Amino acid sequence: MRPSPFAFLILVVILAWLDFYAYQATKTLISKFKPRLRSIIRYIYLAQAIIMLGMVVFLWLAQTGTTSFMFLLSIIFMSYAAKLLAVLFVFFDDIRRVLKWFFEGRKRRYEKRVASGQKMPRSKFLARSAVVAATLPVVTMSFGIVKGAYDYRIRKRRVYLPNLPKGFEGVKVAQLSDIHSGSFFDKTAVQGGIDLLLNEKPDMVFFTGDLVNNETKEVKEYMDIFSKVKADLGVYSTLGNHDYGDYRSWPSQAAKRNNLEDMIKVHERMGWNLMMNENQSIKVGTEQISVIGVENWGAGRFAKYGDLSKAALNAEGDVKLLLSHDPSHWDAQVRDQQPDIDLMFAGHTHGMQLGVEIGDWRWSPSKYIYKQWADLYKEGDQYLYVNRGYGFLGFPGRIGIYPEITVLELTSKPV
């Protein structure tokens, strides 16, 4: 959502101050350069500051979620993240200067050592440290865009469901989530991820929402790729919060409705069984399980189109699997209202596309927003799996939390 003009003005003032303050480190480093070179560097710095603020204004006016929007946003974020780190070092130096002024009547042994050439001046050291620190977010985020955006990982888990019918023993369920096709900039890489999924030969495939960022037409050039996703027991899908067109301005409500109707047709054309507050029995011989698909329902500010009671009405089968985009739905409604749902599949969080995973230990800022944000969770006899997402949104890359293709094997035997 676009911030108000007042909030945007405050943001611009803060960013301008950040630029000015970061420049102090630059001035310290170039203080002994030749006057002409110092002038050139100052003009370059001023030019980039004006360009960055201009890009901020442009993004405030532009449509969010497009590929160009995200790349510009990343450039701006990298620039100001670097400057923020530099400012921290300059700030420490300013604190030193204040303390020095406060105690200026005391002997200055340190400054005398500097004058005699025994030690680098502290301000110069901090300025250089600021420049080194400023490179870290640029290098890290650049790596996340070039390497992390399409570094698809197959995540395999076995889930113990004691009531699983024998005919479904060992069935493989693949899950995709949060494709965000409007963000992609490498179609070949996207195809490579789908090839990885198909090589797993899943029996069923679930897609848990967010096919696009803002509008249905974003998926048009990728339909040929996603149409290849097939499975013997079917491909089932549901909608995420971005699939309804809620994040862009429409000329009329009719245009927004048409966009949603087009989204429903896209799922149909790709051969995906879109489930909008409904359920379907999956049969193997005389045995069956139930797949339930609910429209987006998220705790807090997110849209609540889902009707869990309607979706689960008359669902039959010894095991019930739920597709619901937002993992917050599990604690908010599913566990209390539908205790017979054995396993819920969700996405939505992306793991914030940033974090660290070492073995079974994982950390991401996402954990401070969502209680369940990645991988498999269990409460009582119920399970929740949160997919880390196939695509990306906002930042066009991933750092530490990589795009995921989930393969869950269902078993009635204790794991």
Image (cartoon, rainbow, N blue to C red):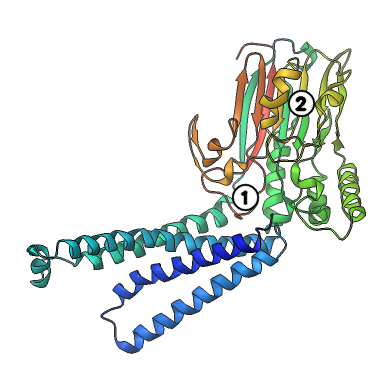
Q: Position of residue 234 (x, y in %)?
A: 84, 31
**Which residue bears the numbered disc 2?**
322
**Residue situated furthest bottom in the rendering:** 36
Residue drawn 63% across the image and 40% down it? 349
Q: CA distance from mark 2 to mark 1?
A: 27 Å
317 or 313, which is in the foreground? 313
Residue drawn 50% across the image and 42% down it? 355
Q: Is residue 373 above or below residue 13?
A: above
Q: Is residue 402 above or below residue 373?
A: below
Q: Kindly identify which numbered label has been placed on residue 22.
A: none
**Which residue bears the numbered disc 1?**
150
Badge 2 element: strand
The answer to whether any part of residue 319 appears in the image is yes
Q: Position of residue 63 (x, y in %)?
A: 72, 62
- Residue flagged by tag 2: what amino acid is it? Leu
302 or 195, which is in the foreground? 302
Q: Position of residue 287 (x, y in %)?
A: 85, 13
Q: Residues within 10 Å of mark 1 (few under 14, many from 20)?
A: many
The answer to whether any part of residue 210 appears in the image is no
Q: Residues within 10 Å of mark 2 (few under 14, many from 20)?
A: many
Q: Position of residue 139 (x, y in %)?
A: 46, 59
Q: Quadrant of the N terminus?
A: bottom right
Marks 2,1: beta carbons within 8 A: no
- Residue flagged by tag 1: what amino acid is it? Tyr
Quarter of the figure with residue 127: bottom left
